[in-house]
Amino acid sequence: MSEIILHHYPASPFAQKVRSALGIKGLSWRSVKIPMVMPKPDLMPLTGGYRKTPVMQIGADIYCDTQCILRELERRYPTPSLFTGTTEGQAMAMSHWSDKALFSAVVVLNFGAIGEHLPEEFIKDRSEMGGAPFDVSRMKAAAPLMLDQLRAFLDWTESMIGDGPFIMGDAAGMADLNAFHVLWFLRKQHPGAGPILEPYAKTSAWLERMDTIGHGTMAPMDAADALDVARDATSTTEAAEDPGDPSGRKPGDRLTVMPDDTGRVPVTGELVSSSAHHVAIRRSEERVGEVVVHFPRAGFRVLPARD
């Protein structure tokens, strides 16, 4: 089996979600550091334009978005399970709360607090990524409102942890990952994170327990070597039709796939397989040859290609 290669940067909260999952499963993996802002010349040949972080590569199969990455890690390495104490549906539905509502509140709080120190290139990049101005002054003004939201979310988290030690009992899993990466981001970036979290003793203790899980066994890898791995490998994804596809898509159809919120760059390719939860398209790039790029369905748009 080809090794796990994670394309990421250290400060990314969504990469932290995957790194913690690798720690829960005790896996060995290779780390390719990518830039925090565009351009990302060593990532684009793999993804075809998808720019968000992280991206997981296994041979010539490229997995985009944490939904897709974590589901694939669970499929390949089922023990210990990320879905301990809960169903996959419950855990993935919870991720939409944490990745959208909870994350949005923390983004406003963090960048409202530190925005004046952000490099201009970061503000420009995030404005382009979001399709709207990355307005630090508006974030600062909205911080009290988001603090109200975060207080409610932290109270939920405190209740979910209960007697712990983890959200679903004795072992950490997807429910923990969903909340942890966002609160990790709060602690890492917000200068007032300590006082914000202080009233939540169970949550603070749980955060420390999550820290001790670590990230598995990581070894660095040069980006050029990762591209060589893709070039020399063959995707293991088999063609599979989704009989329930509401648009009647079939393997071989030309499609474009892109996120529905930010980073809306269409990636075009030929459908290989799909289900209610994923879509995989084959595409070719001179540097890496033929790769199959995997996306989730929730939070993504799948449309007929125009070319």
Image (spheres, grey):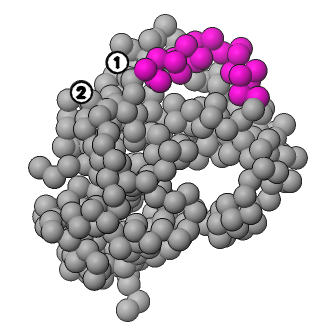
Q: Is residue 90 left or right of residue 36?
A: left
Which residue: 39% across, 39% down? 19
Picture residue at 64% right of the left edge, 30% below the top: 187
The disc, 1 or 2, on the residue closer to the chain's N-terminal end is 2
Query: Which image quarter: residue 226?
Result: bottom left
Residue 243 position, x and y percent, is: 21, 64
Q: Residues within 10 Å of mark 2 (few under 14, many from 20)?
A: some
List x then y, in percent, for residue 73: 26, 43
**Dot 2: element:** loop
Q: Are marks 1 and 2 in contact (CB under 8 Å)?
A: yes
Which segment is the magenta one?
192-212
Residue 305 position within the rendered picture, expressed as x and y whole percent measured from the top left: 38, 84
At horizontal 79% and vertical 41% (from top left) the residue drawn is 113
Q: Residue at x 67, y 38 (%)?
A: 189
Q: Is residue 156 magenta?
A: no
Q: Amino acid at mark 1?
A: Ala
Q: Nearer the viewer, residue 80 or 2?
A: 2
Three-letter code for the amino acid on which mark 2 is drawn: Pro
Q: Is residue 249 above or below residue 244?
A: below
Q: Which residue matches tag 1?
A: 171
- Percent of width and height locating residue 5: 29, 52
Residue 80, numbered circle: 2
Residue 62 in view: no
The dominant secondary structure in magenta is: helix
SS type, badge 1? loop
Q: CA distance from mark 1 to mark 2?
A: 9 Å
- Does residue 66 appear in this view? yes
Q: Is residue 193 rendered to the left or right of residue 166? A: right
The disc at residue 71 is: none
User: Dividing the picture into quarters, in which one does residue 122 lie?
Assistant: bottom right
Q: Report the residue that reaches farthest toward the bottom.
A: 307
